[in-house]
Amino acid sequence: MNIAVTRSQAKSEPPEALVLLPPAIPPLVDPFGREITYVRVSVTDRCDMRCVYCMSEDMNFLPKPHLLTLEELDRLCTAFVMRGVRKLRITGGEPLVRRNILSLFRSLSRHLESGALSELTLTTNGSQLARFADELAACGVRRLNVSLDTLDPEKFRKITRWGDHAQVIRGIDAAQNAGLAVKINMVALRGVNDAEIAPMLEWAHGRGMDLTLIEVMPLGVIEAERVDQYLPLDLVRAQLGERYTLEDIDYKTGGPARYVRVAETGGRLGLITPLTHNFCEGCNRVRVTCTGTLYMCLGQEDAADLRAPLRASSTDETLHAALEAAIARKPKGHDFVIDRNVKKPAVSRHMSVTGG
Ligand SMILES: C[S@@+](CC[C@H](N)C(=O)[O-])C[C@H]1O[C@@H](n2cnc3c(N)ncnc32)[C@H](O)[C@@H]1O
Ligand code: SF4
């Protein structure tokens, strides 16, 4: 780590006037000049649902000792904040099924209070929100993403295998009652929920929530054929455009979505299109798994182990060195393809491992 040494103003002053500044910790900048300001941290690979595009029905989960402890997660997030990260998204698996997870939110809220962090947020399936919404709001969480692919309880059960639709709706109610801004994430699935995109949009906007559509990404081996699930959002946008007036807007949340305003509802629609439009160019994000593996790109295999440096020493010198070495290897982008001739997923890990 650099120690910045500066000389006091007048050139004529003697060498004793050298002033030792506190260690200057430079921001994390990748080889393409992109500053890393957004980190998604997965706190568990476990989940109380088994969405068909995300997990296979019988998943093998990691042994507990492999997972970072809540204290290690706090140290790691704090190291990122010291390096200029302004936005932390807690994800999983299902983050709210991790035992005592609220203690992590509580401790990270100190960075919001100090102003070092601008946003602490999470992505959740909503199942535990009725229990936790008030406390999350008390920890300084202002917005969260809830994943919901359908308004039809039976279809919801089919997509999530284990999920209870009413429980998620109660969770969304609780979040809104706690004053949290909710964004709905909906994975567009051909032949499954394509007819529901317009009703979902009306429903979300009617409740004052943004809706973001996501193209299914080739992550991890699952039972279904991705090519059957894949619905290009270009097509969806064109179809919605026949019914609604969609106006491109400059709204940004730090994530990969591009937003349009729907004139008829007054609400925002986000489109995450890793396949039809590669979103890598302005990528300011990295992801950390619940075992402390840093992925510099969602769609590439290259990774750096941060658990070893975390556990090797109680000071963060080695951790910072590992962070710098990893960011220096951040690739330009991913090369996702979903095609009948490409049988293998782009990367072998599931979204629930890397964290969405
Ligand atoms: C992995 S989940 C983790 C957080 C939480 N369990 C949830 O469902 O919101 C994060 C997001 O990734 C999305 N997702 C999972 N697998 C995906 C895939 N193969 N392609 C695109 N999105 C996926 C989910 O729909 C969800 O919105
Ligand atoms: S998308 Fe979220 S809720 Fe669904 S299985 Fe994956 S981690 Fe669980």
Image (tube, rainbow, N blue to C red):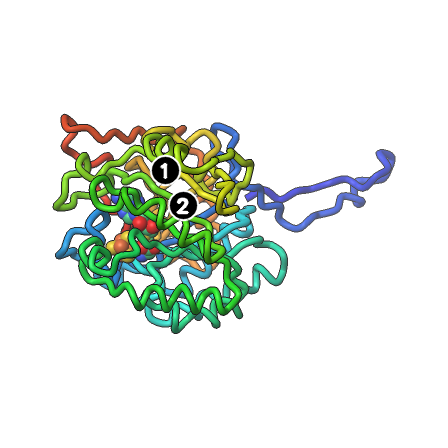
Depth check: give the residue in front, 153 or 80: 153
Q: Earlier in the sequence, mark 1 or mark 2?
A: 2
- The disc at residue 297 is 1
User: Is residue 354 shown to the viewer in this render?
Assistant: no
Q: Tell me the residue at 34%/40% (across/down).
A: 298
Dot 2: few (<14), some (14–19), or many (≥20) neighbours within 10 Å? many
Q: Tell me the residue at 47%/72% (across/down).
A: 135
Q: The residue under label 2 is which amino acid type?
A: Thr
User: Is residue 194 shown to the viewer in this render?
Assistant: yes
Against 86, is 32 above or below?
above
Against 299, is 209 above or below?
below
Can you identify the residue that label 2 sits on?
Answer: 212
> Which quadrant of the view contains residue 48?
bottom left
Q: The residue under label 1 is which amino acid type?
A: Cys
Depth check: give the residue in front, 1 or 175: 175
Depth check: give the residue in front, 175 or 106: 175
Q: Tell me the residue at 34%/68% (across/down).
A: 128
Asked if ligand 1 lies within 8 A of label 1, the reply is: no
The picture places residue 99, in percent across and down from the top left corner, at 33, 70
